[in-house]
Image (tube, helix red, strand yellow):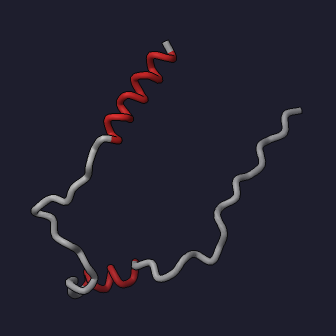
Amino acid sequence: MFSDYMFHLLSQYAKLQKHKPSVSPEAIEVCCCTAQGLQKLYKMDTMVKSAAITGPCKLPSPPSST
């Protein structure tokens, strides 16, 4: 039964790999340059300006089994 599930899972995943994403003709580009007022202020404040200084999070060690 597990192998049936894995086959189904992998075959469905394979269908996703064949998908070719495309940009919709109605799509518009959103840029900080075109925003005005509060929208521009929000976009400028939330923009990533540089990489994080801190390292990645560290997971706690697993509890010891005694």
Q: Position of residue 4 (x, y in %)?
A: 45, 16
Locate the C terminus by quadrant.
Answer: top right
Q: Please state the horizontal and vertical placement of residue 46, each as a whole percent of the image.
A: 40, 78
> Residue placed at 11% from the left, 61% from the top?
25
Q: Seen in the image, is 50 located left or right of residue 35?
A: right
Question: Residue visible at 84% across and 39% down?
Answer: 64
Viewer-proximal residue, 47 or 66? 47
Residue 15 or residue 31, whichever sits in front? 15
- Is 22 placed above or below 45 here? above
User: Between residues 29 and 14, which one lies in front from this camera angle?
Assistant: 14
Left or right position of 40 against 44: left
Pick out the residue farthest to the left.
26
Name the image quarter holding residue 38: bottom left
In the rendered structure, the answer to whether residue 11 lies left or right of residue 56 reads: left
Residue 6, compared with residue 15, is above or below; it is above
- Residue name at image x 35 percent, y 84 percent: 44
Q: Is residue 47 left or right of residue 32?
A: right
